[in-house]
Image (tube, grey):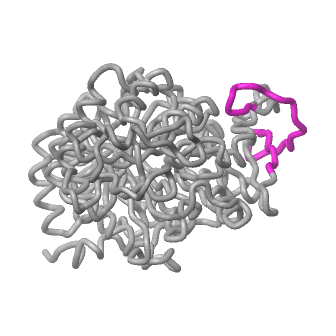
Amino acid sequence: MKPLYQSIRASFSKDIYMPVCPIIAAPTVVLEVKNASDFALLTSEQPPQNVILPISPDLTVAGESLYEVLALCSRSVPILYISDEATVAPLAKFCDFNHVGDAMICASYENRAILAKAYSAMPMLRGMLDCRGLVPEIEKLPALAVSHGATTLILDPEIATADATHSLQQRFIHVLASGSFGKAATRGVNGIITSDLASAYSFLSSFPEGTVMRRRNLLAHKGFQNNGMYSENTITSVVAAAKNYFDGAEIDVKLTSDNVPVVMHNTNTKGLFDCEVAVTEESSYEFLSSLRRIEHPAETIDKFSDLMHEMKQYPDTPVLIEIKPSAKYHKVEMLTAMTDELLRDGLSQENCIGIMGGSLEPGLRYVHKRIPYLPIGWCEGGKSIPPAPENREEAEDRLYRIAQLTEGCAAGYNPEDVNLNRLFNEYAKFRMLHVFVWSRSWTLSPSKWEENGPSNDNTYLSGYDAWTTDHGEKFLGYPIAVEADGILRFRDGHKETAVCEKVQIGDEVFFLYNIELHFGDSYKICSEPIKNQ
């Protein structure tokens, strides 16, 4: 029998069904195969975008050979569900022979050790844990999932509330759930599990243009600088992000010459501190801590440990730690070990995400193995990175490249926003790849709103899982939800009465509230189904 695909790259070539849908970053439509009759849906006019395939140790699915079933998945990304450890070895051999690279592997929460073993044997495949039937501690799930190779969880509909779903997405974990289309979609899940595919597509296609179901994850670049009020990469700016209810704060960490981890982005002190230009990693902590910032003379350089200890009191604001030693100094191992020790000391903020650039060695795989519980992202940018894809083939090429770069890691993708677009994001979401971009405004801190504002608005509307910006103050005042009584809820928890549009989609009724952005664009947030309708 010839291989199913000619190459691993060829396995990414899927004409995934994408109906015209007005929802920004709509949830995927997922079929869970129960019996052989479900296979007909894989070749229907409206096939599932993802399909869960329960695999037996003899590599059959509902009595049919896995080879034949995968051949039917030309328009769907498969999720290979393993329930028996005996399935791992033959499945790995099957995937290797057939060049299967574009798929996910899944196991139940009780059998999560199987997932870790499968992920080790098939590192290009993304992992998923089925937590149905459990009442999990949501805050503990991300570290557990990532350490077993999972970037996605399947939850019972009553567990996948809007707040729980958002909390997991803050930590780079996607959520699949079943239940009513209205409840699942408006709670912001990444995928809806259903056997009624046509009705799901019809439901999602019936909302007004520019509707969003998922809360925009807003990340403060180098902390919340608030248009120059706070200096970048300081305890002050990161705490300000927490106090202003950002969904996370990004920082950069380097080592001094005497191996003290400090929060610093630049390779030298030029333009930031009142001193002769000094190379950060060639200077001692004693020297650097004696300096004062030009625009903020009360601030110096902060220790990484001091910042993480201060953030212990803000567990709902994840810290995105960019491990940023210069390649010249080869201190990835030391900084990784220190980060691991700090996150385990019991005094620090534990709710963190790691970020690492592609030029450092040892790379992302090393960091993941050393800190397996830390969700991590591949960061890249610059002229060497391809521009935003213009068609499906270019999007698939990018996804294949990322799958190679992040092999062996439960990782997300963190590029500059000009290197991506909504087309790429659509194809990425079917692979449950967490896409969190950084805005072009990164070139200056703080950057100029009059120059970078339009690109920030555009990024805000592109549907990415999260985005990092210097201009968070321009977006903090927008409501994050419209509740089922038509009341708006804001980041700080306060609520306001508003005039909302009422729409009926199928048998359910929803409130919609229109939000105007800064340069002419707008979007709509949607309530959960209105009660007693």
Residue 158: give x, y in percent of width and height: 53, 26
Q: Nearer the viewer, residue 58 or 468?
A: 468
Magenta includes 219? no
Residue situated furthest front in the rendering: 276
Q: Nearer the viewer, residue 162 or 281?
A: 281
Residue 435: give x, y in percent of width and height: 46, 56
Question: Quadrant location of the N terminus?
Answer: bottom left
Tell me what residue is drawn at x 15 percent, y 43 percent: 117
Q: Nearer the viewer, residue 91 or 237?
A: 237
Judge whether residue 403 can be spotted in this image: yes
Whether residue 363 sits left or right of residue 198 in the image: it is: left
Q: Nearer the viewer, residue 474 or 56?
A: 474
- Rendered position, 139 above or below 426: above
Residue 488: give x, y in percent of width and height: 78, 33
Image: magenta residue range: 489-515
Q: Please give the count of numbered marks on the rendered protein.
A: 0
Tell me what residue is drawn at x 18 percent, y 35 percent: 113
Tell me what residue is drawn at x 18 percent, y 62 percent: 95
Judge whether residue 431 can be spotted in this image: no
- Rendered position, 83 above or below 122: above
Tell me what residue is drawn at x 24 percent, y 71 percent: 8
Whether residue 433 sits left or right of residue 532 in the image: it is: left
Residue 331: give x, y in percent of width and height: 20, 51
Residue situated furthest right in the rendering: 499
Question: Quadrant location of the C terminus?
Answer: top right
Magenta includes 498? yes
- Rendered position, 347 above or below 479: above
- Rendered position, 62 above or below 343: below
- What predominant SS class does the magenta segment belong to? strand
